[in-house]
Image: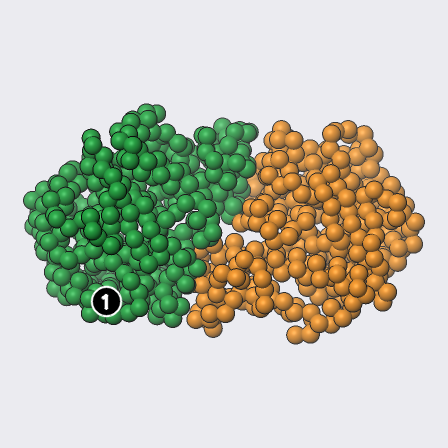
Chain colours: A orange, B green
């Protein structure tokens, strides 16, 4: 526990859940922590001031998006993302790998459709060294390597950054998953080397990514290998790409015991997971942080998260047109203190910009409240009771 | 000056500009005051809290929009707009007339286009008693009369409401303008009667509307007639529909001297005007309040108002991609204190929701600051100096 970056403060007795603290140059993150997503250097519709009021400790920006627009050079000229977007708390960026393999493959907005179709197959070309992909914005060609990804992330300057990995699509064969994993491992070493070579004024921490699709032997091998390297943190990748909740739990059941055996205490981040029931399953297995677009994306659709329930309700439904009750149930957020379901329903029906903002604010507030309760419950040894209570409906 | 609703606090010596105070059940409005527009019971992208921080004293909601969605009955079930949208300061609504005659004529969203074309001619039917029009949302037919407009506005519950009028499109003939004016005058009397007959718990003030297109004899006749009635306030209508800045000034030159001669001291509202140079022209002629979508609509387009300039600049332009300077020039608003031109440029390029919010906030802040300076200048006898200074660029 004599680690500057991460300390464990409490362990649950009945599960692997743990409460801890991550220390960065931009402040502490109490864990387990939710990491909202602000792909393009903004958590959609909210200001940094809102995020602080909500209690957001850290958020996640996407290297792929920011590399394409505005470009890492412009962000670097501001001294990094924190200054660029006026956020002085911790930040994470991903490696760009996930978007390169998904967004960068066949979703060209501005190309003519027959051209896009013709080129679709060749949009992402993986070689030993890196990946060639096309921008989803204008179809322009780009090449990412582990070194390139780390170089961009150094310029973006997030506190926690991620090694370049290949996230194989799902389902895939054992053979392909093995190849992709082996590549991820080679790229992990190269990412680490690049991370140590590029010197700048920023204090950053590097996470390695565990892959291996849904194959137990590969996931175990990957957990063993990645945790043997000198990463500051460990991330579990490729869990959300088309896999079900049960499969996510399985992957964590293969991976987490291996990470737990490693002598070095490091925070574990779960990539792209964040539905309420997933949160409890992941935390119970020892996950410390997780990012997800879910609460913000659902909010913009008018799907409202409510305390004690796994599934959101849809404020667009006609039954809410006259409903004077607050948006959330017993929620103390500034949206619920001011506005009714009927008003939010009206704003969504009228496609008003304020609709997206209010729903996003409330959903994130609920997530932060949930994680605060989880941290408290772990310390009190009541984690399973909280889970039971929250998921009862 | 012994009027509960409106008092004049200072008169400029060189112009007709005057500083005053409007007293409502929801607080005072210091005049001259800008009245931002929140058509659908929301100033687009902003919360009531934002509006207060900006210094907005009063805003304008549209009867036509709120009648169609969510409907005045739902708003009434909340006790009116203030409660519905959680805004406890003064509010204005219009009569619905302007939208009925513009939006309600031929812009059917959901109808099939050939049907819409076929019916276009007959979408707005004016008779002695009122107007038949079709909803721009679903093509449904509706009928507005002066009584109906007042009944809706009583339910919406704004502090200042407006008599039902016909706003003739521009250009028009003297003959048609005279007919429309005569109708507006008859409807003014009926609006007043309906206003006095419908009793509710709300303390509301009724404005009569002066019409007459661009004909001096009609405008003068209308000013004479409307100001002879027992309205609480007077509004100058139909100035912004396709008319130029010079023509606006001409209309005010015909109308305002007549209103000034009337013994009853009443606030004068100018409907739908609010570009910076228009503001100075209108205030110089004695206008007390004016509403306009300009600063908010321009903001959502990325057109940024700057202190001391009449025209906004376009943040979308490539020259701002690397610009670290604040959005406004010497602006103290919370947006300018935190964010650079480059960041706002990025948000607009990326179509991020935060873009519209930040630009709207800044533009409204600038308008409120301008009006605060105007009020101060009138009191100090420096109104013309301020005008010169602000419009010099």
- What residue sits 23% from the left and 34% below the top? B12
Count neighbours of disc 1 (C-alpha within 10 A) and say few if under 14, some if 14 to 19, many if 20 or more: some
**Residue at the outermost top position:** B392
- What residue sits 28% from the left and 38% below the top? B279
Of residue B202 and residue B42, the one placed in the foreground of this image is B202
Residue B76 in view, yes or no: yes
- What residue sits 69% from the left and 36% below the top? A157
Q: Position of residue B184 (x, y in %)?
A: 14, 56
Q: Position of residue B188 (x, y in %)?
A: 15, 59
**Residue identified by numbered label 1:** B148
Mark 1: secondary structure: helix
In the displayed structure, A24 sits above or below A19; it is above
Q: State left or right for residue A125 relative to residue A311.
A: right
Q: State left or right for residue A307 relative to residue B297.
A: right
Indicate the chain on which mark 1 is placed: B
Residue A148 in view, yes or no: no
Q: Position of residue B254 (x, y in %)?
A: 12, 41
- What residue sits 76% from the left and 53% below the top? A31
In the displayed structure, A295 sits above or below B197; it is above
Of residue B324 and residue A52, the one placed in the foreground of this image is A52
Q: Position of residue B28 (x, y in %)?
A: 33, 51
Quarter-wise, where is residue A308 in the image? bottom right
Locate the C terminus of chain A and report the quarter of the image it occupies: bottom right
In the displayed structure, B348 sits above or below A77; it is below
Q: State left or right for residue A278 relative to residue B286.
A: right
In the displayed structure, B151 sits above or below B178; it is below
Of residue B326 and residue A155, the one placed in the foreground of this image is B326
């Amino acid at each position: 526990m004599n680690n500057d970056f991460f300390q464990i403060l409490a362990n649950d007795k009945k599960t692997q859940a743990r409460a801890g603290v991550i220390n960065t140059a931009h402040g502490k993150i109490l864990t387990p922590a939710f990491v909202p997503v602000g792909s393009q250097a903004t958590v959609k519709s909210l200001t940094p001031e809102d995020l602080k009021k909500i209690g957001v400790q850290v958020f996640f920006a996407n290297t792929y998006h920011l590399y394409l627009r505005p470009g890492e050079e412009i962000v670097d000229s501001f001294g990094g993302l924190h200054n660029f977007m006026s956020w002085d708390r911790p930040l994470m960026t991903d490696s760009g790998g996930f978007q390169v393999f998904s967004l960068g493959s066949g979703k060209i907005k501005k190309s003519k459709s027959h051209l896009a179709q013709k080129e679709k197959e060749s949009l992402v070309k993986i070689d030993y060294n890196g990946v060639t992909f096309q921008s989803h914005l204008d179809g322009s060609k780009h090449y990412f390597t582990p070194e390139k990804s780390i170089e961009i992330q150094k310029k973006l300057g997030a506190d926690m950054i991620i090694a370049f990995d290949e996230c194989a699509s799902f389902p895939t064969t054992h053979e392909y998953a093995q190849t992709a994993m082996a590549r991820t491992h080679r790229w992990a070493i190269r990412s680490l080397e690049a991370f140590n070579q590029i010197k700048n004024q920023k204090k950053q921490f590097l996470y390695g990514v565990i892959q291996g699709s849904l194959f137990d032997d590969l996931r175990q091998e990957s957990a063993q290998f990645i945790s043997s390297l000198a990463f500051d943190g460990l991330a579990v990748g490729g869990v959300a790409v088309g896999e079900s909740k049960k499969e996510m739990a399985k992957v964590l059941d293969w991976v987490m015991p291996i990470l737990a055996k490693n002598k070095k205490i490091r925070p574990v981040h779960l990539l792209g997971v964040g539905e309420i029931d997933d949160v409890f399953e992941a935390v119970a297995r020892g996950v410390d942080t997780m990012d997800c677009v879910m609460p913000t994306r659902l909010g913009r659709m008018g799907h409202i998260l409510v305390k004690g329930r796994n599934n959101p309700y849809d404020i667009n439904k006609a039954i809410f047109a006259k409903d004077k009750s607050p948006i959330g149930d017993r929620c103390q957020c500034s949206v619920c203190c001011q506005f009714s379901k009927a008003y939010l329903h009206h704003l969504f029906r009228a496609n008003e910009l304020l609709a997206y903002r209010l729903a996003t604010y409330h959903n994130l507030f609920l997530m932060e409240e949930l994680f605060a309760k989880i941290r408290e419950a772990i310390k009190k040894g009541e984690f399973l009771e909280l889970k039971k209570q929250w998921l009862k409906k």
